[in-house]
Image (spheres, rainbow, N blue to C red):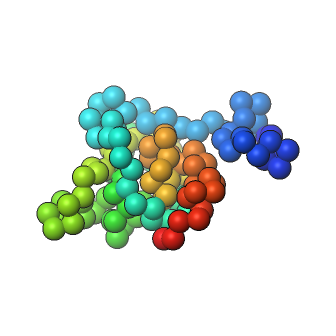
């Protein structure tokens, strides 16, 4: 893996790395919620590692207000909160442990892509 001390502009996985590639959501084109432009509020500044089962459909919280993070608990439906973001439905092709984004700023929803390491996100209060 490329050292980020030598190349500080690199914050994602290197293609020559022994690390597994960042997974992709197979349901990305199926659900329209995946095309939302706005991100939710930052829930945490580090990702959440958890074991996911192949073929099972999950709902990842994008708004950042769910009490059952990283998954949606329908808090976004509270009309008084006026939340615009909807959860991201996703599945995985292999049963194993995955890193799910908790900063809600990832470009590869719902999987962590290292965006939480950016200085502007680390400086924000949670």
Identify the residue at image location x=34%, y=57%. Answer: 63
Q: Is residue 1 above or below residue 78?
A: above
Q: Nearer the viewer, residue 37 or 69?
A: 37
Identify the residue at image location x=33%, y=65%. Answer: 66
- Where is residue 93? Give x, y as percent: 47, 36
User: Which quadrant would residue 34 be assigned to in this image?
Assistant: top left
**Left or right: 121 in relation to 66:** right
- Where is residue 77? Give x, y as percent: 18, 60
Q: Is residue 103 above or below residue 81?
A: above
Quadrant containing the N terminus in the rendered view: top right
- Where is residue 116? Give x, y as percent: 58, 55
Q: Is residue 50 above or below residue 54?
A: below
Identify the residue at image location x=60%, y=62%. Answer: 122
Disc tally is: 0
Q: Is residue 85 above or below residue 70?
A: above
Identify the residue at image location x=48%, y=58%. Answer: 102
**Left or right: 46 in relation to 55:** right
- The reply to whether residue 44 is in sight is yes
**Left or right: 74 in relation to 8:** left
In the displayed orientation, state which residue is furthest to the left: 79
């Amino acid at each position: 893996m490329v050292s980020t001390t030598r190349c500080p502009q690199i914050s994602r996985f290197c293609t020559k790395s022994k690390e597994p590639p960042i997974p992709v959501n197979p349901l990305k084109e199926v659900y329209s919620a995946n095309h939302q432009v706005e991100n939710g509020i930052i829930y945490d500044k580090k990702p959440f590692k958890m074991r996911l089962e192949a073929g099972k459909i999950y709902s990842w919280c994008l708004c950042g207000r769910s009490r059952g993070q990283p998954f949606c608990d329908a808090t976004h439906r509270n009309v008084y909160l006026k939340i615009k973001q909807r959860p991201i439905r996703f599945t995985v092709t292999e049963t194993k442990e995955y890193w799910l984004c908790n900063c809600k700023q990832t470009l590869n929803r719902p999987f962590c892509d290292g965006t939480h390491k950016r200085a502007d996100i680390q400086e924000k209060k949670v």
